[in-house]
Amino acid sequence: MSIKLDFHVHTKLNGKKLITTEQLSKGMRQSDLYGVAITNFHELEHAISIREAIKDRIIIVGQEIISNDGHIIGLGLNKKIADLRSAEETIESIHKQSGIAIAPHPFIPSGIGKKVATLPFDAIEVYNSIIGKMIIPNYLAKRQASKAKITPLASTDTSDYRYIGWSYTEVLTDEPKEIFNAIVRGEVKLKKRGLPLPIIHILKSILGFSDIESWSLHQMFCYICGKSVIFKIVRKKYLCLDCGNQFLSRIICCNGHYLCNDCTIKRNSYNSRSRTEYTMPCKILKKMPDGRLKILVL
């Protein structure tokens, strides 16, 4: 017997529901999954509410944590893990809650990178459906998991219920309480399938289009204007529109807005617990005659 699970699903971001309880149930039924792990950023509340509402499937409460070294997923949590701490502290906090620590997409810019082989992870996401067709990042993750003898996992990392379970991990146990133990022992089989590439979205990003709508399969939107963020090949210095400090980053809004990790977390924390939207004075960047960038408050 075995249990099929998608260990990396996003249902809410910055106070916005991406997948409802009904949609999640439908997605799991369509993919013939036994359950999912909900791994939202910065909060557990939406995952907990879905777990309470869905009784015929396994809903694992998790969190994708932004550590100072890269993203880390904690599964089996009952308390939110703080962002912006070291990877070692983050993993220790997960284990203190009797959860398991997973390294998601370690070889993309937001991942943990080569440190994945030296940290006490319980599993490594060696196949992420979002980056599935880019091949190299998943290949590197698989190689590191094999070298370090850490359990490999496959998941979708999607925010669209229609694609839940395109990739999944089959845990070789018939007892839900044994899922984490089976993962640690490496008793898994992987189903791998890449999600469709957002060709139009990629072309618009490369060509410098503005007001690009976020890709539904993996929504990442600007906390200021709500439009899509885009990824640059080379890191550049950008000015955070909330705190006014400069940071190196590859990620910026298609309309030129940038928020540092600290300010992003502050906005998300506010929107997750409030019914009113986080508001700041309207700010724009203006290039001065001497070439400096200045924040103007309107």
Image (cartoon, rainbow, N blue to C red):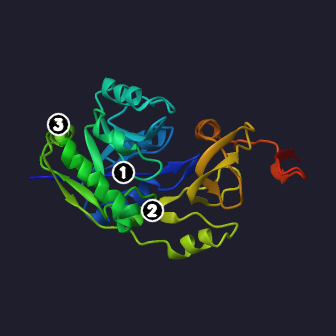
Q: Which mark is residue 181?
A: 3
Q: On the rendered structure, is 176 left or right of 49?
A: left
The residue nearer to you, when weighing 56 against 83, is: 83
The residue nearer to you, when weighing 277 against 220, is: 220
Q: On the rendered structure, is 174 left or right of 86?
A: left
Q: Residues within 10 Å of mark 1 (few under 14, many from 20)?
A: many
Q: Which residue is mark 2?
A: 160
Question: Horizontal and vertical percent for residue 116?
Answer: 32, 41
Q: Amino acid at mark 2?
A: Asp
Q: Residue at x 25, y 38 (%)?
A: 122
Q: Residue at x 45, y 62 (%)?
A: 160
Counting every numbered tag in the picture gives 3
Kind of element beneath mark 2:
loop
Q: Is residue 150 visible?
A: no
Kind of element beneath mark 1:
strand
Q: Is there CB contact under 8 Å for labels 3 and 1?
A: no
In the orientation shown, which residue stands out farthest toward the left?
1
Q: Amino acid at mark 1?
A: His
Q: Quadrant of residue 202?
A: bottom right
Kind of element beneath mark 3:
helix
Q: Which residue is mark 1?
A: 8
Question: Horizontal and vertical percent for residue 288?
Answer: 88, 51
Q: Is residue 8 visible?
A: yes
